[in-house]
Image: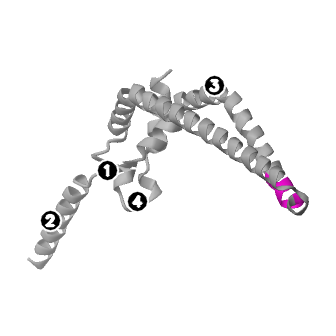
Amino acid sequence: MKTISKVLAFAGLLLTTGVAFAQQPVVGVVNLEQALFNSQAAQEMQAAISEEFSDDQARAERLNTELRELVTRAQRDESIMSDSEKRKINSDAQEKQVQLQLISERVQAALQERQQAFVDSMRQNLGAAIQSVVQEGGYTLVLNADSVAFFDNVYDISGKVTAKLNELNQ
């Protein structure tokens, strides 16, 4: 009788454990921004933007070099410069800083605009890629990485989503 009770208890334990295992959620965490901006389409967009603004980048580098030279010259020759030379260098430096600021603001605004347009154009494909990865991986719960305080990298499916996104965009 004791043996039968033990066997029944053990069988009950196995059944409950099996049910518990069957109900365990399969969790994934996705970093949407990383998945999207690591995609081939994002790389191509970034290359196009770099090419489009290469003249501005070269001009900004040139202005930075000229500004550094002005500052170095002003520091080096301050004791032998007249007041008018100091004012001229100051004026030139301010002008170069204003030009740098304008270039920076224009490029930054254009970059944000392009990135937002890219995100908008890819939103549907990103959703489809996530859905496909969820179905293929049997995930029952997928969380946004920005909403999770901590997660082990074993749960990160961002790379899978990027790969699926690349596949969908071909």
Residue linked to disc 4? 151
Q: Are marks 1 and 3 in contact (CB under 8 Å)?
A: no
The tag on residue 12 is 2
Amino acid under label 1? Answer: Val
Seen at 39% across and 51% down, the residue is: 145
**Closer to us: mark 4 or mark 2?**
4
Q: Looking at the image, tell me whether mark 4 or mark 2 is earlier in sequence order.
A: 2
Amino acid under label 4? Answer: Phe
Q: CA distance from mark 4 to mark 2?
A: 34 Å
Amino acid under label 3? Answer: Glu
Q: CA distance from mark 2 to mark 1?
A: 25 Å
Name the outermost residue toward the left: 1
Left or right relative to 97: residue 148: left
Seen at 36% across and 49% down, the residue is: 28
Left or right relative to 54: residue 84: right
Residue 73 coordinates in the image, percent (x, y): 86, 54
Seen at 64% across and 30% down, the residue is: 50
For this rendering, which residue is in front, 16 or 156? 156
From this view, report whether residue 6 is shown above or below residue 40.
below
Residue 44 position by quadrant? top right
Residue 89 coordinates in the image, percent (x, y): 79, 49
Look at the image and say whether residue 50 sits in the magenta stretch. Answer: no
Q: CA distance from mark 1 to mark 3?
A: 44 Å
Q: Looking at the image, tell me whether mark 1 or mark 3 is earlier in sequence order.
A: 1
Q: CA distance from mark 2 to mark 3?
A: 68 Å
Residue 81 coordinates in the image, percent (x, y): 88, 56
Residue linked to disc 3? 52
Write down the region rendered in magenta.
Answer: 71-77
Left or right relative to 71: residue 99: left
**Closer to us: mark 2 or mark 1?**
1
Residues packed near mark 3 inside 10 Å, few (<14), some (14 to 19) or many (20 plus):
few
